[in-house]
Amino acid sequence: MRHLFKTAAAAAVALSTSLAALPAFAETLTFVSWMKGEPGYGDWWNEVIQKFEASHPDVKVEMTKVSRNEYADTMFTMFAGGTPPDIVHLAAFEYQAFANEGWLADLGPFIEKSGMDLKGWAGQSTCEWKGKTNCIMLLYTAYILAYNEKLLKDAGIASVPTDWNGLIAAAKAATRDTDGDGVTDVYGLGVDSSGGSNMMHDMLHFVLDAGGNWTEDGKPAFNSPGVIEGLARFKQIYKDGLTPKDAKAGDMRQLLIEGRIAMRLDGPWIWNVMKGADPAIRDNLKLAESPLNPPVGGTSNVIGMPSDISDEKKALVWDFIQVAASKEMQQRFATLGSSPAPMPGLDYTAEIKADPNFALFAKANDKASAAGVDRLPKGLELQFNEVTKIVFREVQRMLIDDLSPQEAGANMQAAVEKIAG
Amino acid sequence: MIDFSSPKHRSKFGYLLLAPAVILMALIIIYPILLSVDISLQDVRIARIGGDHAPWTTKNYEWLFHSEEFWNAISVTARMVLIVGGISLIIGLATALLVNQNFKGRALARLFVALPWAVPEVVATVIWAWMLDSSFGVINWMLLKTGLVSQAVQFGSNATAAFMAVCFVMIWKGYPLVSIMLLAGLQSIPAEQYQAAKVDGANVWQRFIYVTLPNLAPVIGVTSVMTTLWVFRDFSIIYVLTQGGPIGATTTLSMLTFEQAFAFFRMGQGAAVGVVTMIICAIISRALVGRFAKSVH
């Protein structure tokens, strides 16, 4: 018994000593992100956290991963349950619903007090909601053309297409039944036709090139000539069987690296996907400027803070945001993420030297940004998911019932006007 | 001090013992239901628990009953319940009768019958989604190779094909449970009843109609309720295969609830669909259980 007591006492002392040796944090900031663990952007977040914690030794940032698929639902549940994360990371197309509920703090006073210069910051205007600055834009990207050089050459296409006519001709030539079994096994172009935001973005290529956009001056413009021409192009690609049908953007990327798709318009992230291809195919996979003008581009993700946390926490979160938005970390963003940062005036010489595609990405960004392109339709931010559903439904109706693009555009316009109020 | 052993207070002791379970039930079942009803009566995009309460209104129910989407979802759900429930019952009964016989390899046959039920739903559905792919799926390849179709079936953009594909996967996933339940029911039928029927000169078909089916009626009733409720609430199969499309051809009430609440962030409307679905399910369950129970007694 005496021995047992001694052992228990020794264990208690050891436990208390070891607990005392652990760092005691005065404050913990919770941070939820889908990027945790991602090569590139995940590494960048780790560096931001390290830098912040180095300057705030008594504060710990607790980062948790939630997958992109259930991200919006999870964040809504957290906010609705009154337990939002302290550092709010959201996609640029979903933050508006949070801002609209008054759940995001106005960063205006913090920006003013700290003197942060956001002039020329790519996509920052998207963070303005009802006259308040609810976030800081973290990424603006434009789309480029990923193609399989061998498949194009085999189809007799000597050079990369540079306009719509060239693109459709190359897609037609490259769509082939290579083994003669009567089933198409190589498609010229990979276009998402499975619904959702990726399908909207894929269609936007054709709409922008035809001189249109989903909205004009914040009002729905689905029956405008540009949108109708875009719908006609999409219908042609689908009906002529130039793209795998009903497949998602992710499936298209996979098919590209398997050598089953000759061309795909996509964001710079496709480069990382292409790196995973079998070496025999990887050597044929190349990137080029989008043949469609202007290229699709858009805001990607934002950082902000909840409105109902304490002022002390708000001050800490603002410090964290300032670290992320600092020149040093923006430069690291470009290096680690292999894409231009939203901060203007950075020197990309080293990045271009390390990655030849970086110049292509930067050029595409400049082109899309200069044309004021954003894949999120201005004025329909709150209803974006409903709009994508309507567009998908009416496109399917156009394809199944063989409606004209004019009829499909008119149906979309009527339905969107109804929900937009 | 109450003497619970006295006849006067004995019932109180019973209530006391039941109280924790009843309170727990109230917390985990009744509270969320009341919360859903409460949200369905508020005109809110996003409801926040403990936040400001919007005034009660019938606006969401007005939207619901005037919405084409709701009536389409009712129609899709009803057709799906009838097709999936009916065919699952037929296949389940057939396979149960089969594996109830004595034959070599019966244990293996029972395993194969139950296998689809054991595979996680999302995993199975993703596999089916690939097999049913319009461009590269093995189903289309087989249909084309055997000459059954001249063009690939567009499972994602043909309303009938999409509906049938969803029903097929649901039946594949759902019939094993029916089979297992009915097999248990078959094994509980006394052999004497079959022997007596045989003595009376009943043939196989008559024994099935007059002995097997009446004895199985309560099990069929419970199984029908379970299958119906499963089809009503199943979400993952439809979401992975068609996301409710094309043009609402596979949008059931559960898909509509999810879409309104979590895709469009119209939680008031989503809750209204959920509440109506719950009422429909309660009525169907009561009717089915009551009917089959009555048929036995």
Image (spheres, coloured by chain):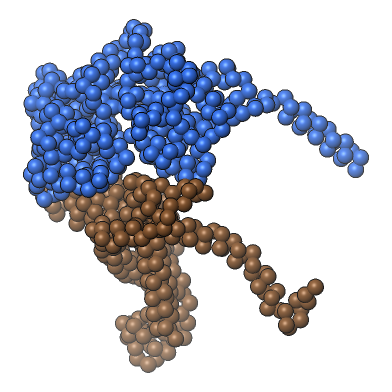
Question: Foreground residue, A256 or A329?
Answer: A329
- Is the N terminus of chain A in the top left, top right, bottom left or bottom right quadrant? top right
Question: Residue placed at 34% from the left, 57% from the top?
Answer: B60
- Letter of the brown chain: B
Question: Residue placed at 44% from the left, 34% from the top?
Answer: A104
What tint does the image give chain A? blue
| Quarter-of-image position of residue A233 | top left
> Residue A46's spot in the image, x, y percent?
49, 22
B227 to A165, vertically: above or below? below
Q: Furthest residue to the bottom?
A: B200
A34 to A371, vertically: above or below? below
Q: Is residue B94 left or right of residue A313?
A: left
> Residue A229's spot in the image, x, y percent?
10, 34
Q: Mark yes or no: residue B25 visible.
A: yes
* Numbered disc total: 0
B72 to A302, vertically: above or below? below
Q: Is residue A48 left or right of residue A382?
A: right
Question: Foreground residue, A65 or A61?
Answer: A61
Q: Mark yes or no: residue A147 visible.
A: no
> Residue A116's spot in the image, x, y percent?
43, 17
Question: Residue placed at 34% from the left, 14% from the top?
Answer: A344
Question: Residue placed at 52% from the left, 59% from the top?
Answer: B31
Q: Is residue A91 left or right of residue B245?
A: right
Question: Foreground residue, A395 or A412?
Answer: A412
> Residue A205's spot in the image, x, y percent?
18, 29
| Quarter-of-image position of residue A381 | top left
| Quarter-of-image position of residue B7 | bottom right
Question: Foreground residue, B241 or A386?
Answer: A386
